[in-house]
Amino acid sequence: MSNSVEIRLSEQRDDLIDWVTDKFQEFMQDERIDDALALADEFFEWLDPEQLDTEETLYTDYNEIRE
């Protein structure tokens, strides 16, 4: 995997973490506790600062597989 792909994936993951965190806080403020818990359950490893940098992100380039 090229360095530019790694950087792009890292940026996308960072954006997703920001979105999940913001959405979780929004649900909590709106008292949508079940929605917040469902989101937290799905993204637990990314929301936990102790696990954030150790959780693997799996990536598949389907065009590369076809070759």
Image (cartoon, rainbow, N blue to C red):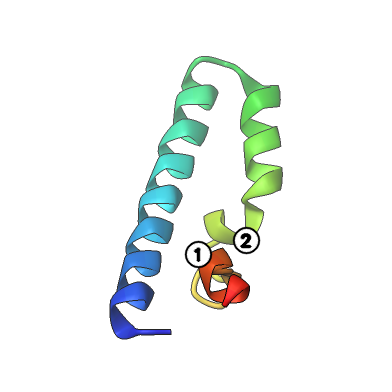
Q: Nearer the viewer, mark 2 or mark 1?
A: 2
Give the residue at the far bottom of this rendering.
2
Name the residue type under label 1. Answer: Pro
Give percent across and percent down for residue 32: 61, 18
Crowdedness of circle 1 by 10 Å Cα count: few (<14), some, many (20+)? few
Helix, strand or loop status at disc 1:
loop
At mark 2, the secondary structure is helix
Disc 1 marks which residue?
A: 49
Determine whether, in the image, residue 57 is placed left or right of residue 33.
left
Residue 36: percent from the left, percent from the top? 61, 31
Q: Is residue 20 above or below residue 11?
A: above
The furthest residue to the front = 67
Q: Residue at x 53, y 75 (%)?
A: 64
Question: Label 2 belongs to which residue?
Answer: 45
Decide: is 26 above or below 17: above
Amino acid type of the residue that numbered disc 2 sits on in the rendered structure = Glu
Drawn side of residue 12 relative to residue 35, left or right: left
Return the mark for residue 33. Answer: none
Residue 46 is drawn in which quadrant? bottom right
**Marks 2 & 1, CB-CB < 8 Å contact:** no
**Viewer-closest of 28 and 11:** 11
State how far apart marks 2 and 1 are (Cα): 8 Å
Instruction: Examine the rendering and report whether any part of residue 65 can be seen.
Output: yes
The quadrant where residue 62 appears:
bottom right
Residue at the location (53% across, 24% down)? 27
Crowd class of label 2 (few under 14; some 14 to 19; many from 20; radius 10 Å): some
For the question of whether residue 55 can be seen, the reply is no
Horizontal placement of 25 versus 51: left or right? left
Give how far across and how far down residue 54 sits, in percent.
Answer: 56, 78
The answer to whether residue 48 is above or below residue 65 is above
